[in-house]
Image: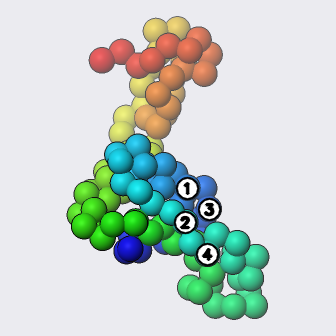
Amino acid sequence: MKRVFSSLNLAEIHHARNLLEAEGVRAFVRNELLSGAVGELPFTECQAELWIADASDSVRAERVLREGLVRGAGMGAPWQCACGEILEAQFSQCWRCGRNPSP
């Protein structure tokens, strides 16, 4: 087992876990319930942590997280749907008409 990521943001931790599992890397979250103790305990002790089951997957896991979290952060140019709606880069489908971005 090896820790590959930590954050105070539970949504970010679960997103990272989903990225890893989609690539076939077994991952699990630790300290998920400690966020309520922030203030009573040091925040560094309360961060949720993402661990992988097999340490030999660490290089692949770090690559997946590096690429996936940057892509998920909205890096990239906005796109315009055929219906005319302008959407930010992180959206993979138009909210108005449901179309995907044109290649």
**Front-lying residue, 95 or 6:** 6
- Distance, label 4 to label 1, CA atoms, is 12 Å
What secondary structure is marked by label 4? Answer: loop
- Distance, label 2 to label 1, CA atoms, is 8 Å
**Is the residue 11 above or below the residue 29 in the image?**
above
Residues at badges 3 and 1 in contact (C-beta under 8 Å)?
yes
Crowd rating for badge 4 (residues with CA inside 10 Å; few <14, some 14–19, many 20+): some
Residue at image mark 2:
29
| Image depth: mark 2 or mark 3 in front | 2
The answer to whether residue 29 is seen in the rendering is yes
Crowd rating for badge 2 (residues with CA inside 10 Å; few <14, some 14–19, many 20+): some
| Image depth: mark 3 or mark 4 in front | 4
- Distance, label 3 to label 1, CA atoms, is 6 Å
Residue at image mark 4:
31
**Front-lying residue, 78 or 53:** 53
What's the residue type where badge 4 is placed?
Asn
- Distance, label 2 to label 3, CA atoms, is 9 Å
Residue at image mark 1:
14
Residues at badges 2 and 1 in contact (C-beta under 8 Å)?
yes
Residues at badges 3 and 4 in contact (C-beta under 8 Å)?
no
**Is the residue 81 above or below the residue 44 in the image?**
above
Residue at image mark 3:
10
Q: Is 32 on the left-hand or right-hand side of 100?
A: right
Crowd rating for badge 1 (residues with CA inside 10 Å; few <14, some 14–19, many 20+): some
